[in-house]
Amino acid sequence: MRWKAIIFLGLLSSLSLAGLTQAGRAQAGEIAYTVRPTELKAKPFSDAVTLARLEQRTKVEVIGRRSSWRQVQVDGKTGWVKMLSLKFNHIVPLWGADRKAGDTGLAALFNVASTGSTGSSVTTGVRGLSEEDLKHTKPNPKALEVMDTYGVNKSEAQRFAKVGKLSSQSMEYITESASGAKK
Amino acid sequence: MKTKLLLVAVMFISTACANMDMDKVLATAGKVAQGPAPISETQEIAMGRGIASNLLGAAPLLDNKPVQKYVNQVGRWLTLNSERPDLPWHFAVLDDEDVNAFAAPGGYIFITKGLLARMKSEAELAGVLAHEISHVLKRHHVEAIRKNTRTSLITGLAKDSLRQSGVSPVLTNLIGVGTELYARGLDKHDEYEADRMGVVIAARAGYDPYGLPAVLQTLQGMNPTHSNLALMFKTHPSLSDRLDLLDRAMSGSLDRFETQPDLANRFTTVIGQ
């Protein structure tokens, strides 16, 4: 069974998805700001050594993620902060001094065409699905039939999970009240 | 009962004042008087199929079978960890630069190439798919369609089910309402609920549960004026509000799943390079 999976993965890797992700997994250059006073930890654990105490609105450069932690660089130090203590910003925050001009971040990273250097960029790439497209659409039963052929049955899904070493866990849903005040 | 009557009266007066069409007034009155008619699972699936077909009329499928299969494998595994594992779940990547994902009743889930291209791991894909799956689990679209449709039409659907074949005019009408919903969006509380449920379903399926907030943060880092974000921004609550609520919902409750894998390598092998 295992060799089949290996062959399958081999096939997948040889069939590249041209144009989908040109930039690999690099995450350099993502800028975020702390939304609250936050400890910079040496490792992605709450009981790890604290390298620094970051004040609210500290600018950091995000370089990676492990579960609920983001690896960041700040003032020459590299460490970990809780990911939801960060807010990612494209536009200058009100308190910020330096500006991230144009669409030089992810859009460039993923080669999504854009122009403009004033911060209000204009897309020049292929226009995406719009409200108008949805209003004037017509059924496409042929495409639906093709979509049907991609379907995966239960045992296939279970095999896929096993190859990825994914195992089912039990957990109740989080209630609205547990998530704090209603917005 | 008194409250209901009062409501009807208020609605009549206010709608009449606003000079709205009589159909709408009657529909509102009808809904209040009769209450909602149930929509069966068979009807839900038929409706979803029609809406999916319409969506595929607006954006083509990505012509890449390995990627389509992979997204179905991730999605189908997630559904096995949900309350509705036996729906005819189908997943598809749309060949579209827009950054978005859609759910249609009965188990039809779509994600655009533009969103997939910005993801970094299988856990992130799982998080987004689980959010969409949650809309189906809670029948958010079915309920929204019912709220936006005249009661007589829903009653007509019940009569319709006695007929055997084909898509009836009544169903076609509801499918139209359902398709329009993609341009208007669901209630924001449906979106928050799908976020809260999505992270739990990802955790149940054995994934790092922080994939969904990670994707939301990636989108937060994009230029908000980017035209490929317009429809998603119009139809969803703000990323800040969603992340803020996820922060509160997830803190503490998901700690025991911290070490679950994100399968970034498997994702990269299939999607990247």
Image (cartoon, coloured by chain):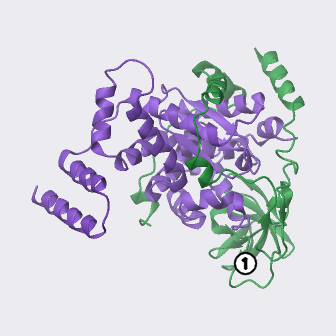
Residue A40 in the image: state x and y as whole percent.
Answer: 73, 69
Q: Which quarter of the image is occupied by the C terminus of chain B?
A: top right
Q: Can you tell which quarter of the image residue A120 is in?
A: bottom right
Residue under the point 14% across and 63% down: B6
The residue beneath circle 1 is: A58
Residue B197 position (above or below residue A52): above
Query: Is A181 left or right of A56, judged from the image as shown?
Result: left
Q: In this view, does A23 lie above or below B273?
A: below
When asked about the image quadrant of residue A148, the answer is top right
Rendering coords of residue B113 (x, y %): 73, 44
Q: How crowded is mark 1: few (under 14 residues within 10 Å), some or many (20 or more)?
A: some
Toward the left, the furthest residue is B2
Check disc 1 and report its element: helix, strand or loop: loop
Q: Where is residue A118 in the image (x, y as percent from the top left)?
A: 81, 77
Q: Is residue B209 visible?
A: no
Chain colored purple: B
Q: Which amino acid does label 1 sit on?
A: Thr
